[in-house]
Image (spheres, grey):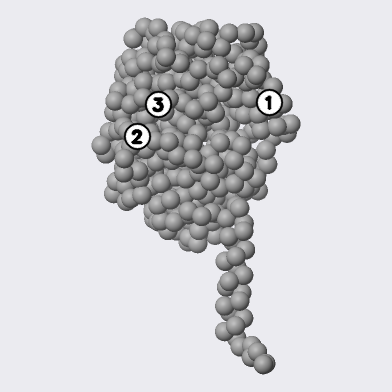
Amino acid sequence: MDLKITPFFFFFFFAHLISVTKALDPCASQSDGSQDLSIIPTYSKCSPFSPPKADSWVTTVLNMASRDPARVNYLSTLVAQKTTSAPIASGQQVLNIANYVVRLKLGTPGQLMFMVLDTSNDIAWAPCSGCTGCSSTTFSTNSSTTYKSLDCSVPECAQARGLSCPATGSPGANGCFFNQSYGGDSSFSATLVQDALRLGNDVIPKYSFGCINSISGGSVPSQGLLGLGRGSMSLLSQSGSLYSGVFSYCLPSFKSYYFSGSLKLGPAGQPKSIRTTPLLRNPRRPSLYYVNLTGITVGRVPVPIAPELLAFNPNSGAGTIIDSGTVITRFVQPVYTALRDEFRKQVQGTFSSLGAFDTCFAATNEAVAPTITFQFTGLKLTLPLENSLIHSSSGSVACLAMAAAPNNVNSVLNVIANLQQQNLRILFDVANSVVGIARENCN
């Protein structure tokens, strides 16, 4: 029997071929819908960014963790501020901490960008065309029909620091420019602009963000930054009622090669049953997500910690925050020392150091390693060992994956970091002032 081939045959054949090819592509996002975006580690195989030269993913994590002190110092500086405006972060301490990225589009028509998730900052940044010192991955302002540069008269310009506006002349005739210095010999400049931000099927038509046009010295990653804080310039604020002040994420392990984590925006699709703890607000730094950490348990032993070392204090900035940009959890020195000493007491044996980790031991002794539990108001989080230990590239050494915060005058902040958040659904409900945590396998 002869088979008659028609144009419809070719249409359905190629449509099927395309769908099968996408299904077999491990980097094809399975969840970039209206309110669910895929998250990947910056240096995974599905990321467009080349990883730094390293002999293993452990070395990459160690390199990233080595920048944590600068990140924590930056966060401590923020909480010590007396202004209630939402500051634009200084470069290296934030832009050089690039752990997880999400795919989104800027402009009309939309241009694909990969931006770093940052829960402790508000404003978004993007490297723009014509940028001196930027990589080839830039946002083309001339290709967007909805692009608009903002001037010094707009309220958003007054909410950022480092701005440069003439003291005289017509305010509306001058752009809102920023110059940021960092690292002693490095800096970048940017302009505050507006354009359409496209998240899956959602479009926020007039989204204000910083358009980076010059970088000098140092090393600033090519990806942009998406601010998920709760200040006036953040995604939650600029999206209005679209997401009702609610988002959650599940961060995959740094070893995850493909799109597997997710960022869920809005109340729809969030876990129905999830344990929550109150979200605290510091009026002197409203962007940070403070929670009330009341105690730490190692195995079955409560760690002896003076209450004032964990207490929330909006005047000094003291307390505990959940942060997506710090790699390993950092406690103020007395808290970390007490935790570490109890952990060592239960593991016993000989201990050594590896990079930022000062409590490393033979992996053969891992069977006796105790679990670590963070006790929050109304919520207990017991970390699985994969969230509390990290192994050497050979696998022969295991290390407690936490450290002390930098010891300086602003060292009052405890930070629950992203390695301890991996494979957990972290829900931020700003409208109801709660943070929720539930187990979820993102790998």
Q: Secondary structure at mark 3?
A: strand
Left/right placement of residue 150 relative to residue 394 reads: left
Name which of mark 2 and mark 3 comes first in the sequence. 3
Is residue 389 visible from the viewing direction of this image? yes
Task: Determine which residue is flagged by label 1.
Answer: 395
x then y, percent, for residue 235: 39, 43
x then y, percent, for residue 134: 63, 42
Task: Determine which residue is flagged by label 3.
Answer: 381
Identify residue type, mark 2.
Gly
Which quadrant of the figure contains the C terminus? top right
Name which of mark 1 and mark 3 comes first in the sequence. 3
x then y, percent, for residue 201: 42, 58
Which residue occupies the foreground of this view, 213 or 67?
A: 67
Q: Residue at x 61, y 74 (%)?
A: 14
Badge 3: residue crowd in 10 Å (few <14, some 14–19, many ≥20): some
Left/right placement of residue 428 relative to residue 47 reads: left
Which quadrant of the figure contains the N terminus? bottom right
Q: Residue at x 27, y 39 (%)?
A: 431
Query: Where, by quadrant of the figure, is residue 8 drawn?
Result: bottom right
Residue 436 is labelled as 2
From the viewer's perspective, is residue 384 above or below residue 45? above
Kindly give the residue lying farthest to the left in the view shown.
Answer: 432
Identify residue type, mark 3.
Leu
x then y, percent, for residue 427: 37, 38
